[in-house]
Amino acid sequence: MKKFNNDDNLIEIIFEDDFIIVINKKNGLLSHCNKIENSISVVSLLKKHDIKLYEAEDSLRDGIVHRLDKDTSGLMVLAKSLFSYKSLIDQFSDRKVIKVYKAYCWGRPIPIAGTIDKPISNYLNRKKTSIVGRHAITNYKVTKNFKNYFSEIECKILTGRTHQIRVHMQSINCPLIGDQLYSKNRNISQSFSGNIRRFLKDFRRQALHAQHLSFMHPKNKKMKSFFTEMPSDMINLRDELVAEFNLNC
């Protein structure tokens, strides 16, 4: 795997050929900029390192077929040609791409495994979203429970709406730990140890990682599957929760 670093924003190249590139994005890095923003992004970093991407009408979105929120880490695939772009866009549209996320949320979802099928729309200049509007489906299951105070969950999204997992988990009263839009007013129990209270207060991004990505390669039509471990901040979060609630994991 190839890594390069620029302005403390790290991209790890998981796979690359003449048609696609799959990367592991660090949290804090935009997938792409817009005409107002003047920030570093996945697109600008790849192009700076002379990686050819499909040329979109908006050059700031070159290669983009899907995106991750700035503070969500994990796997992304980008197109390197018009042929690849059309193939990947069709696969996303037809829900043939498998996207699985690991996350940590407040509380315990009820039931512990299920489907959230609620529409999502954007408001507040696209900074925040609400349960109304476009069709959105998220499958989730609890993979670890921390005495009902917190849960480790796995989410598989069948649609790709803005903030989909974040909004859907908030809609069942289980917002993601660290989410500065959807759980920032969540009270931290005084019964917790000082150590975990400080850790939760200092965890300043949604605990969400795109861990698994599968799709059909545009050229050879074979399924490609990729997996990446959680980043260190989420591993540390898990370890702190395990220690706080004396779980054997």
Image (spheres, rainbow, N blue to C red):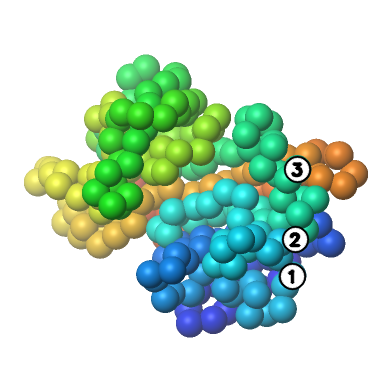
Element type at marker 3?
A: helix
Q: Position of residue 127 (x, y in %)?
A: 30, 52
Residue count near mark 1 (Cα–Cα under 10 Å), binned few <14, some 14–19, many ≥20: some
Spatial separation of the CA atoms under disc 1 and disc 2: 6 Å
Q: Position of residue 34 (x, y in %)?
A: 45, 65
- The one of 177 and 129 positioned closer to us in this rendering: 129
Q: Earlier in the sequence, mark 1 or mark 2?
A: 1
Q: Which mark is residue 52?
A: 1
**Residue 225, can we see it?**
no
- Label 3 with label 2: CB-CB less than 8 Å: no
| Residue that appears at 43% across and 74% down | 39
Q: How many marks?
A: 3
Location of mark 3 (residue): 87
Location of mark 2 (residue): 80
| Residue that appears at 57% across and 73% down | 44
Element type at marker 2?
A: loop
Element type at marker 1?
A: loop
Residue count near mark 3 (Cα–Cα under 10 Å), binned few <14, some 14–19, many ≥20: some
Q: Position of residue 48 (x, y in %)?
A: 63, 80
- Label 1 with label 2: CB-CB less than 8 Å: yes
| Residue that appears at 39% across and 71% down | 37
| Residue that appears at 80% across and 50% down | 83
Question: Disc 2 residue type?
Answer: Lys
